[in-house]
């Protein structure tokens, strides 16, 4: 991968647009947002030849939309439908036809990743590089390049093989022959509280399932399935609230870490933003029960659903969101901010103290040395900043005893995360104190395969 040029990702203070700006009615904010989104996709990560053009007319609303007013394209509405651009061809006989995974192929707890691998958008082995992740998830779902790259590099650092630059969408695998790793990479399936976290949309908390958060739980899926016949972002936010409360009320080891604790809210929003089917009649997209079942590998009639592990499919005759309106870090964290206005208790860090329903929260100010606190966390771009900076700060402690030389890993992470935090104009986070989490037994719970 080419080196990232820090100057390419730098945005002037005058061009900075924050989530708080959506609460104004100034036309200039819309123009700034257009500039930001154009810059974000085209210059943030220096992927020559891989970054799609994004039209300058793309813009966020001047006001952060209320949940009930948001379409299935998220806070940035899709403006047009282009069948040639959005059709995802997975017909039998095509290069992206469905092929069930083999016995050695990795599949895991993320249905979107499994489906992408089953159709060859990601390597069918389930082990991918950063470039393969960016290209494949862009082609399959129009996931933003900068977001895909950042999430991939974090997965590589926390759960993969930083020497080879690969990560597994499922379980552990053999590392590169180049050496440097002191154990096999875990894959994201076995990354509890580092990448994977409690309160998943369809998986049971690891502690409540003998350490294994991989299997889909039919009862939890049915709870989501029965919410609607055509799903909205509000439906997924309501489901997020349900599984969040379910975890706190039943899991004595429930824990929400600064990075991993934000993964489930983002995952809930992925379901709508990346799985909805778009058309000329419904430009914003619609997610039906049949489409949901296909992406989650569910068969059978209502009331008798069956899950087939690892067989997630992109439906035929399915059209993704426009490539001109990718789902990147800016809209993703805008979505989480909207969630926080409806259910602020979901965006909290801390955990249960050894018994169910004993949640104690930790103020972000105690973690960041006062740079961010529970009030300022949801102001501006601070939530996105905290997400990425928490991952950066946590990596050295997670990798102690796993990698013989941390320096190349940290350099790799900074190469892809720093442009995003610079773009968001993040405050410097020189302190990241995790000692406040020592009171939570779940913080030290890291089951292995």
Image (cartoon, grey):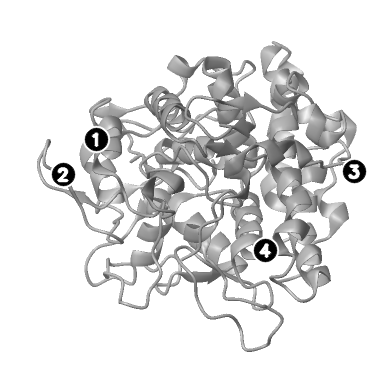
Q: Is residue 104 left or right of residue 415?
A: left
In this view, the residue farthest toward the front is 354
Ranked by sequence position, the earlier of labels 2 and 1 is: 1
Can you identify the residue that label 4 sits on? 157
Q: In this view, does 56 lie to the left or right of 67?
A: right
Question: Mark 3 and 4 residues: CB-CB less than 8 Å, in contact?
Answer: no
Residue at image x 67%, y 48%?
41
Distance (Cα) linking label 3 and label 4: 20 Å
Question: Mark 4 and 2 residues: CB-CB less than 8 Å, in contact?
Answer: no
Ranked by sequence position, the earlier of labels 3 and 4 is: 4
Can you identify the residue that label 1 sits on? 222
Q: How crowded is mark 1: few (under 14 residues within 10 Å), some or many (20 or more)?
A: some
Q: Is residue 400 above or below residue 263?
A: below
Quarter of the rendering occupied by the N terminus:
bottom right
Can you identify the residue that label 2 sits on? 305
Quadrant of the rendered structure where residue 23 is? top right
- State the SS at label 2: loop
Ranked by sequence position, the earlier of labels 4 and 1 is: 4
Closest to the observer: 436 or 66? 436
- Give residue 330's mark: none
Ranked by sequence position, the earlier of labels 2 and 3 is: 2
Q: Can residue 267 be seen in this view?
A: yes
Ranked by sequence position, the earlier of labels 3 and 1 is: 1
Question: Mark 2 and 1 residues: CB-CB less than 8 Å, in contact?
Answer: yes
């Amino acid at each position: 991968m080419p080196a990232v040029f820090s100057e390419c990702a730098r945005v002037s203070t005058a061009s900075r647009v924050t989530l708080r700006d959506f609460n104004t009615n100034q036309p200039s904010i819309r123009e700034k947002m257009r500039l930001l989104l154009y810059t974000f996709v085209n210059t943030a990560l220096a992927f020559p030849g891989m970054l799609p053009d994004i039209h300058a007319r793309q813009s966020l609303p001047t006001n952060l939309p209320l949940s009930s007013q948001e379409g299935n394209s998220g806070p940035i509405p899709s403006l047009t439908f282009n069948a040639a651009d959005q059709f995802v061809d997975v017909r039998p006989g095509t290069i992206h036809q469905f092929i069930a995974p083999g016995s050695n192929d990795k599949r895991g707890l993320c249905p979107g990743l499994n489906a992408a691998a089953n159709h060859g958008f990601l390597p069918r082995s389930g082990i991918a590089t950063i470039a393969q992740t960016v290209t494949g998830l862009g082609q399959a779902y129009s996931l933003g390049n900068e977001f895909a790259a950042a999430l991939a590099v974090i997965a590589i650092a926390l759960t993969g093989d930083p020497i080879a630059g690969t990560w597994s969408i499922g379980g552990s695998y053999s590392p590169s022959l180049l050496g440097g790793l002191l154990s096999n990479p875990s894959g994201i399936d076995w990354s509890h509280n580092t990448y994977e976290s409690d309160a998943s949309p369809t998986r049971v908390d690891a502690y409540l399932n003998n350490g294994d958060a991989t299997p889909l739980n039919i009862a939890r899926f049915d709870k989501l399935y029965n919410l609607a016949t055509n799903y909205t972002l509000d439906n997924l936010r309501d489901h997020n609230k349900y599984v969040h409360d379910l975890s706190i009320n039943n899991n004595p080891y429930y824990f929400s870490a600064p990075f991993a604790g934000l993964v489930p809210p983002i995952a809930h929003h992925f379901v709508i933003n990346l799985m909805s089917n778009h058309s000329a009649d419904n430009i914003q997209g619609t997610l039906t029960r049949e489409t949901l079942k296909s992406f989650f590998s569910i068969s059978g009639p209502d009331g008798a659903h069956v899950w087939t592990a690892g067989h997630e499919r992109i439906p035929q005759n399915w059209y993704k969101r426009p490539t001109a309106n990718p789902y990147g870090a800016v809209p993703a964290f805008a979505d989480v901010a909207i969630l926080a206005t409806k259910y602020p208790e979901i965006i909290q860090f801390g955990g249960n103290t050894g018994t169910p329903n004993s949640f104690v929260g930790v103020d972000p100010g105690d973690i960041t040395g006062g740079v961010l606190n529970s009030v300022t966390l949801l102001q501006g771009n601070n939530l996105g900043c905290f997400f990425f900076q928490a991952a950066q700060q946590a990596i050295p402690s997670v990798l102690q005893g796993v990698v013989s030389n941390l320096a190349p890993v940290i350099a790799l992470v900074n190469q892809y995360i720093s442009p995003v935090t610079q773009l968001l104009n993040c405050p410097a986070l020189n302190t990241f104190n995790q000692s406040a989490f020592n009171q939570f037994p779940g913080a030290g719970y890291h089951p292995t395969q």
